[in-house]
Amino acid sequence: MNGEEFDTEETGNGRLSAHAVLVKLSYAYRSDPGAQRPTNEDFAGAHAPGTPDDSWEHGALFVLADGLGGHAAGEVASRVAVETILQRWTEGSGGQPHQGLRAAVRDANAAVFDAAMEHGRRGMGTTLTALTLCAREAIIAHVGDSRAYLVRGGHCTQLTSDHSRAAEMVRMKLITPEQAANHPARSMLTRSLGGEPAVQIDIIKQPIDNDDVLVLCSDGLWDLVSRAEIAEVCGAVGSPGFPTPNEAAAHLVDLALKRGAPDNITVLVIRITSPLPFPPAPTRRSFFRRGGG
Ligand code: CA
């Protein structure tokens, strides 16, 4: 079962959706402009060939980006970032998967930075959260205020830190998490991809179990849908209500739309469906080369 859909006419990155049920995992993503914005500046993508599972040349990779800058800049930044990472990843990485992931994100930073210079789009940038699976670990590369969650045993745990002023103030205990939820600085980013020639990238490693659900989302979703609701919906993936991540992703987007959805909404849901290890990314190729040289 596979599906992919793009609808980009006049709406930035438009509505996106894709889903697949593979041997060791199933996944889906949905991206929607929301109820109040004319264009979608979010973007998402996945690389997860499923046949034959154990001969994957490269591990699965899931990427989500929330573009910044307005006036056709945000939608370009998010798309350039996601497409660059997927391309670098599938070209082959050197060393350990987390090194390959970091190198791909660095290349994406340079690609967005170059695109901003080229088109005179100062202030263009994007958040970036990318996840790969290696052996029995999820490895996440993260910049900005999109989030990765782990849903396990009825609980939803945030795996990433928000790189925003409001989150920084919470960490410094200047405001409470409750105050941060409505704080004017909650969407002011302290780190983004593409704004500077170099970027600091968080790498997070999380052991995974069979039946775990990993969720990536932009702030347009987490601002309106609580962790408890994400736990409830994603914890039920595999049940008749939400047989696959596709139904869960659609339901989460619908919840945000019903609540007014002032921002673009993107969610990516991955369910681990096997106790077997994932093949790691290959180690035999050399490091990424920029510009194909
Ligand atoms: Ca957003």
Image (cartoon, rainbow, N blue to C red):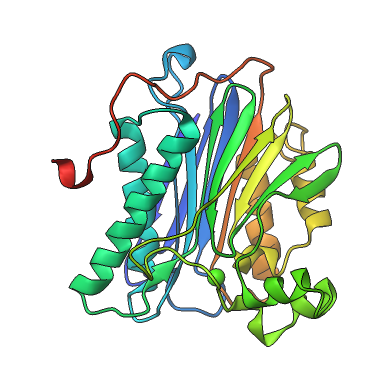
| Quarter of the rendering containing residue 3 | top left
- 85 relative to 286, above or below: below
Closest to the observer, 207 or 269: 207
Residue that appears at 76% across and 52% down: 230
Image position of 16 with respect to 34: above or below? above
Q: Is residue 176 left or right of residue 42?
A: right
Q: Quadrant of residue 223?
A: bottom right
Q: Ligand 1 appears in which quadrant? A: bottom right
200 or 262: which is nearer to us? 200
Residue 243 is left or right of residue 124, and the answer is right
Residue drawn at (81%, 72%) of the image: 177
Residue 57 occupies quadrant: top left
Q: Is residue 258 visible?
A: yes
| Left or right, residue 71 beside residue 166 | left
> What residue is shown at x 49% (from left), y 63% (from top)?
127
Q: Is residue 46 visible?
A: no
Could you say where residue 66 lies in the image, as x and y percent from the top left? 49, 64
Q: Nearer the viewer, residue 44 or 121?
A: 121
